[in-house]
Image (spheres, grey):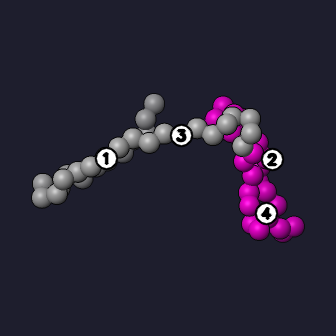
Amino acid sequence: KSILHRGLVNKEKVRISWAVSCEPPKEKIILKPLPETVTEDQPPLFEPRTFSQHIQ
């Protein structure tokens, strides 16, 4: 299902659009915060997970 979106029409300019999709390897990519954003005072909110776990 696509997200809701809105486009504006400009009658004076040509509109160009293209679809782009990519999907990383499901079990190789580990999603986690950047180390420099994590401290003892601000620990990660979630455990690291794979892309496969993320899209479920």
Residue on which the image places disc 3: 22
Question: Which residue reaches farthest right?
Answer: 40
Q: Are marks 4 and 2 in contact (CB under 8 Å)?
A: no
Q: Earlier in the sequence, mark 2 or mark 1?
A: 1
The answer to if 52 sits in the magenta stretch is yes
Q: Which mark is residue 29?
A: none
**Mark 4 to mark 2: distance in Å?**
13 Å
Q: Are marks 3 and 4 in contact (CB under 8 Å)?
A: no
* Residue at screen point 79% across, 57% down: 44
Looking at the picture, which amino acid does disc 4 mark?
Pro
* Residue at screen point 74% across, 39% down: 28
Q: Earlier in the sequence, mark 1 or mark 4?
A: 1
* Residue at screen point 75% across, 66% down: 37
Q: Secondary structure at mark 4?
A: helix
Looking at the picture, which amino acid does disc 2 mark?
Glu
State which region is magenta. Answer: 30-56
Residue on which the image places disc 2: 47
* Residue at screen point 31% across, 46% down: 17
Q: Secondary structure at mark 3?
A: loop
Residue 26's place in the image compared with 18, above or below, is above
Residue on which the image places disc 1: 17
Q: Earlier in the sequence, mark 4 or mark 2?
A: 4
Q: Secondary structure at mark 1?
A: loop
